[in-house]
Amino acid sequence: MKADKIKVMSIFGTRPEAIKMAPLVQELSRRAGIESLCCVTAQHREMLDSVLHIFGLTPDFDLNIMEPRQTLSTITTKCLLGLEGVFQRARPDLVLVHGDTSTAFSAALAAYYGQIRVGHVEAGLRTYDKYSPFPEEMNRTLVGDLADLHFCPTPANRENLRREGIEKGVFLTGNTVIDAMTTTVRPDFRFSTEVLNELDYRGKKVIAVTCHRRENYGEPMEHIMAALRHIAETYPEVELVYPVHLSPVVQEVAHRHLDGLANVHLIPPIDVEEMHNLMARCFMVMTDSGGLQEEAPALGKPVLVLRRETERPEAVRAGTVKLAGVEYDHIVALARELLTDPAAYDAMAHAANPYGDGCACRRIADAIEYTFGQRETPPAPFGA
Ligand code: UD1
Ligand code: UDP
């Protein structure tokens, strides 16, 4: 048994990574055999800080790299250079990265250059289309090559890695976002965004919307926004709530199409507790986000995915998520079906939890202790 503490540095930079890494950082901090360090790149700023605040996390290192309309190359080079110095100072035994962002890829690459072991949280999701999602599919695949430990949310994710010849250091853990939801969703929750308290969740059909992805910039996003406008104009019983991502590209197109309608609420990004409780109360979700595709099924809410593909097919198979694509007619048709056909709605509105059971962080921490010789046996896989 190894007596020394394992120095584990969790690195993240965007809102979704923070939401999914926060419960893991908390779990690692509770382990006697682990020294847990947290480094943020701040690829996002306000949207990241909001999550840090909710979960009470104070980073040990903050690279503060965000700039308006940042390019992928700037994000990557700033992270690489910044992390080199951080690693020289902190000398971690293991670096943990999350998912498919440019922060995750650069941090895994920087750790590899420093010959530091890498653990990949949310490993093995794939579309096998390198431009969709762009650049996330390639980021995630490259992190898979760089990583020593792979924490897969679902059996299908583990199978993807197996097909690519990655079998060592793979653990089936569930997704940490389900762990995060065990603390955020509360029936008596009061929103600090007042319009969310005022909405008539029973009498109206509240649709929670998010849309921000780079591969949707341009024509696809124009079609999506036009479809959302049509839905709001055609169905007066709809209240469309869209917390708009702070990206200036997204802000411009959303406001241009959707301003000026009484039943459309374009609001600034809301904090994660507000988002989860909004989803828990809404009629349905329309989104191109990855995280919402995992969260809404757990809450029994139908999801229309505003993308051509998804690396999260489990909820599609469970019947709670449909791929709506990015064409105006198809999005409108699928929304119409859910809004006007109660049988179609009921067929999708049931709770499904293919992504986790709320114990992913415990399994990941156990797997780290096992790998570093502090534990005799690996954790039992999610679902076993
Ligand atoms: C990034 C991830 C994407 C993830 C998304 C979650 C990459 C390549 N993409 O995309 O996978 O789905 O985060 O939201 O890593 N901004 C602010 N304040 C903030 C956050 C963003 O002003 O708190 C603005 C900045 O102008 C920034 C722009 O948003 O330039 C876009 O942010 P960026 O991190 O480049 O990409 P995302 O589209 O957020
Ligand atoms: N989210 C949030 N506030 C918002 C919109 C989303 O807290 O205004 C949460 C959402 O519940 C999920 C995560 O942010 O946990 C998803 O992040 P995002 O859509 O930015 O990224 P993706 O999941 O597409 O990578």
Image (cartoon, grey):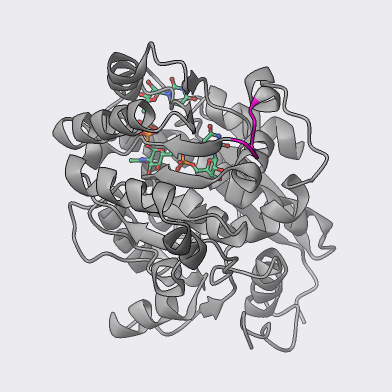
> Residue shown at 65%/43% (left/top)?
281
Q: Nearer the viewer, residue 88 or 352?
A: 352
Q: Nearer the viewer, residue 313 or 95?
A: 313
The answer, for residue 91, to whether it is visible in the render is no
Q: Is residue 199 left or right of residue 375?
A: left
Quarter location, residue 360:
bottom right
Q: Is residue 272 above or below residue 351?
A: above
Q: Is residue 144 left or right of residue 17?
A: left
Residue 154, percent from left and from top:
50, 75
Q: Nearer the viewer, residue 1 or 171?
A: 171
Query: How many numbered badges does the structure rendering display?
Result: 0
Q: Is residue 254 above or below residue 142?
A: above
Q: Specify the principal SS of the magenta part.
A: loop
Residue 268, percent from left and from top:
52, 20
Residue 228, percent from left and from top:
33, 32
| Magenta-span inclusion, residue 161 | no
> Residue shown at 83%/40% (left/top)?
188
The answer, for residue 26, to whether it is visible in the render is yes
Image quadrant where one finds the N terminus: bottom right
> Residue shown at 31%/27% (left/top)?
229
Q: Nearer the viewer, residue 121 or 231?
A: 231
Image quadrant where one finds the C terminus: bottom right
Q: Is residue 206 left or right of residue 143?
A: right
Residues rendered magenta in the picture: 199-203
Q: Is residue 146 above or below residue 237?
A: below
Residue 167, percent from left and from top:
41, 85
Furthest-top residue in this view: 260
